[in-house]
Each structure stands twice: as structure tokens, then as C-alpha cells.
Image (cartoon, rainbow, N blue to C red):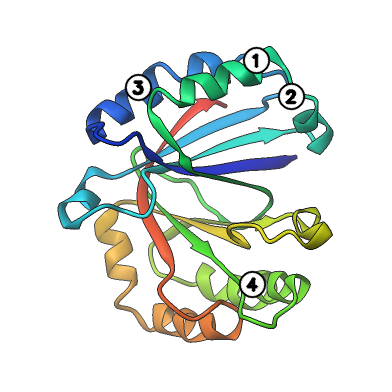
Amino acid sequence: MVKALSFFKRRAGMPVEEFQAYWRGRHPDVVAKLPGVRRYVQSHTRTAAYRSGEPVYDGIAEVWFQNTAAMHDLRATAELAAVQADEARFIDRSTMGLIVTDDHVVKDDPTPAGAAKGVGFVRRRPGMTVEAFQKHWREVHGPLGAALPGLRRYVQSHTRLSAYTRGRDPAWDGVAIVWFDDSAALRAATTTPEWDRAEADDGNFIAPGPVAFIVTTEHVIVA
């Protein structure tokens, strides 16, 4: 399967609580009607993040399809038009981006309800090919991340190579997704030698500068 991963900010002036309530309570009615949807997950940025300012995104949506042909079949359909019209009710569509990814599951232990789901958006190191970036991330960095104490699940969502054809440059080269029992467990992991080893490897394949990162709560809409 392939995954469409979108990221966005809420409509200007909309309270976070109202945004989250609409997204979870009303928007699934139109998304679930899209032909070909195999799985649909919303991840809402935790409200604690807003105490120190605006996070980079208010959340991400992940929608799985059998293949890219199923996604392309949605073009110009009434169902997709309905989704886009409803998005305008609660999303600032000028902030919205989407990447189509292949998922690589690095660790897959059970996660408790309400787990802290960390989502990191990454760009490859300047001058590095997409293929080399993906290989290093998967084969070298993956095992380092999997060793983090308290980590329950770890998925790398690699932007598909087809996104780079004809000179295109996707917003992100991939998204790292990690699950911990709670925010305290995630914070504790950042104080360990295992974290230091993984962080030291970042410069070998990730562009310099801070990684855009949000801590979210996951809601499975279509299982």
C-alpha cells in the first residue's frame, strides 16, 4: 500500500479545541466516502504544545490506498471535491502540504491507547541523492532509533521517488514517526546515550538545522 500524508495549520482565528473537534467529529464523514481508502488516521498536535507558541503544524492526516492508481482515480471526482470544500471550513489550505510515501516499519511493539506519537519532518543533507538518503535512514539510522529506551513503535515514511521526477522538490523527504507510552517517556528517552548516538548520526543524512517536530495523539478513523 501507499500512504498520502498531509500536514496543515488550522483556519486563522479558530481555537485549537474547535479545530480538533471539527476535524475528528465532522470531517471523517466526507473522507470515508473517498473510493479506495484502506485506512485513515488523524494525529492531533497535543494542546500542551501551544503553551510555548504555535507548533509548526496542528496535525497530520494519513490515508492509505492500495496503490497510486487508486489515488489518481480520485482526480476530478465529486467525493474529492467534497473533501476539499470541507477542509476550507477548518484548515488554512495555504499551509497545507502532502507527500505520498512508502512506510518502513522499524519497530512494531504494541502501543497503549493515548500514546504519545512524535512526528518529525526531515530533509536530506544538501548534495545527497534521494536514494542515498533513504538507504542511510533505513539501514543505518533505523537501528539507532529502534534502540531508544521506551520506544514502542517506529515508522519511517519515505517520500516516493516518483515525487522527484521532472525537477520537482517535495516539501519533505520523509517523516519519522515514533510512539512512546506518554510524553514523559519520550522526554526521558532524550536524556539517554542511545538518543545521543542517534542524534550524532543526524548530520550524516539530514539537512542542518532544527527538525520540525510535533507530539500528537493518534485517532484511527478507518482501521
Rendering coords of residue 127 (x, y %): 69, 83
State which tag comes first along the sequence, 2 or 4.
2
Quadrant (top left/top right/bottom left/bottom right) for the N terminus: top right
Q: Earlier in the sequence, mark 1 or mark 4?
A: 1
Q: Give the number of the disc on residue 74.
A: 2
Report the front residue among 146 and 18: 18
Along the line of sight, which residue is nearer the eye, 48 or 117? 48
Whole-Å distance between the Cαs marked 2 and 1? 8 Å
Mark 2: which secondary structure?
loop
- Reading the image, the residue beneath label 3 is 22
Q: Quadrant of residue 71?
A: top right
Q: Is residue 158 above or below residue 137?
A: above
Which of the two labelled residues, at mark 3 and mark 1, occupies the earlier sequence position? 3
Which numbered disc, 2 or 3, marks the residue that appears first in the sequence? 3
Q: CA distance from mark 4 to mark 3?
A: 36 Å
Q: As drawn, is 213 to the left or to the right of 202?
A: left
Q: Position of residue 49 (x, y in %)?
A: 24, 52
Q: Residue at x 36, y 43 (%)?
A: 58
> Compared with residue 155, is residue 2 higher up or lower down, i.e. above or below?
above
Mark 3 and mark 1: span between their CA atoms? 19 Å
Residue type beneath disc 2: Leu
Residue named by callout 1: 79
| Badge 4 amino acid | Trp
The x, y position of residue 75, in whole percent, is 75, 26
Residue 117, position in %: x, y?
40, 50
Label 4, residues with CA under 10 Å away: few <14, some 14-19, many ≥20? many
Label 2 crowd (10 A; few <14 / some 14-19 / many >=20): some
Q: CA distance from mark 2 to mark 4?
A: 32 Å
